């Protein structure tokens, strides 16, 4: 049993370190977490133009069932409507359907789906299934690793559930939204691996966009971030997103920081 435990540690460390530049801060890669592993995250998001400063806390548990299938379960808590309270939750699943491997590079393609619920009143057309709206989302992700550089593109379609009881008078009702992103990650340190306990330092730049098909309104955010991975098991993210261009009415998440801590446990699931 001890041999299996240490073997799992080596495999987990190799995967997390060798492809750490794919662990994007604002989006998910097409790659999955190691088989039979569990990850625990706590994320804090802060918005400065709500009006005033507000924040959201997102506890999350991730499950790596096998090399092709993983799932996330999240809860959302914030003070965006006054006192801090539980807003809702989300279930996310991702299935990897294509893998092409080569020396120091690989290509992955995955399909994902998300189901979210929220008790928040509806404010804008900027459908956000991370605490603000109830709805469904589906899409595809393509990720290419090229030695120390990882590139990823995501395309998604979101439908918000109709709930007139929570619609604010005078505000447009969310319906459907196209989302798209282009993410890049670069492994800065270590320059060369000697063991899998070495700290990893990654830098990221992500472009995050949405378009409302009914009105043609859209926006594009720029999101730089940094990341540290310790002992192949602990991950710390810090990022900030801001709107570069757009005309989507009533956005309040266009200036937002993200701070996250993640802890991974391998060979847990049987």
Image (cartoon, rainbow, N blue to C red):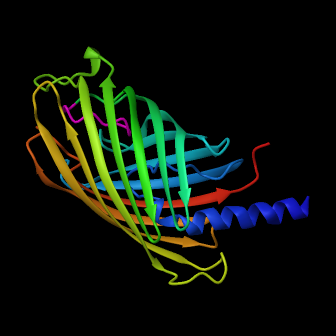
Q: Residue furthest front?
A: 102
Q: Is residue 40 above or below residue 80?
A: below
Residue at x 56% of width, y 78% of height: 199
In the displayed structure, does residue 213 sit left or right of residue 265?
left
Q: Nearer the viewer, residue 251 or 202?
A: 202
Residue range highlighted in magenta = 123-132
Q: Residue furthest right?
A: 1
> What x and y, as percent, mark residue 243?
17, 54
> What x and y, as percent, mark residue 142?
41, 47
- Residue 51 seen from this side: no
Q: Nearer the viewer, residue 43 or 30?
A: 30
Picture quadrant where residue 83 is located: top left
Q: Is residue 93 above or below residue 145?
A: above
In the displayed structure, does residue 170 sit left or right of residue 259?
left
> What x and y, as percent, mark residue 229?
54, 70
Residue at x 25% of width, y 25% of height: 176
- Residue 60 seen from this side: yes
Q: Judge whether residue 126 is colored magenta.
A: yes
Quarter containing the C terminus: top right
Q: Is residue 149 above or below residue 54?
A: below
> What x and y, as percent, mark residue 70?
59, 41
Picture quadrant where residue 140 is located: top left
């Amino acid at each position: 049993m001890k041999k299996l435990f240490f073997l799992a540690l080596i495999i987990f460390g190799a995967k997390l370190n060798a492809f750490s530049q794919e662990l994007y801060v604002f989006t998910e890669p097409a790659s999955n977490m190691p088989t039979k592993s569990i990850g625990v995250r706590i994320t804090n998001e802060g918005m400065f133009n709500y009006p005033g400063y507000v924040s959201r806390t997102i506890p999350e548990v991730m499950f790596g069932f096998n090399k092709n299938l993983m799932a996330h379960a999240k809860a959302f808590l914030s003070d965006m409507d006054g006192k801090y309270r539980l807003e809702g939750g989300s279930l996310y699943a991702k299935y990897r359907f294509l893998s092409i491997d080569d020396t120091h590079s690989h290509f992955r393609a995955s399909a994902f789906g998300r189901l979210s619920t929220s008790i928040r009143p509806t404010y804008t057309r900027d459908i956000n299934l991370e605490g603000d709206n109830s709805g469904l989302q589906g899409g595809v992700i393509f990720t290419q690793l090229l030695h120390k550089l990882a590139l990823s593109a995501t395309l998604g379609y979101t439908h918000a559930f109709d709930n007139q009881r929570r619609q604010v008078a005078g505000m447009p009702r969310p319906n459907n939204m196209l989302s798209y992103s282009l993410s890049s990650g670069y492994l800065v340190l270590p320059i060369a691996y000697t063991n899998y306990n070495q700290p990893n330092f990654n830098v990221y730049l992500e472009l995050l966009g949405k378009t409302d098909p009914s009105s043609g309104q859209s926006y594009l955010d720029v999101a730089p971030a940094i990341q540290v991975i310790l002992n192949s098991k602990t991950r710390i993210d810090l990022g900030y997103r801001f709107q570069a261009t757009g005309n989507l009415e009533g956005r309040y998440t266009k200036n937002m920081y993200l701070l996250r801590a993640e802890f991974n446990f391998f060979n847990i699931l049987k």
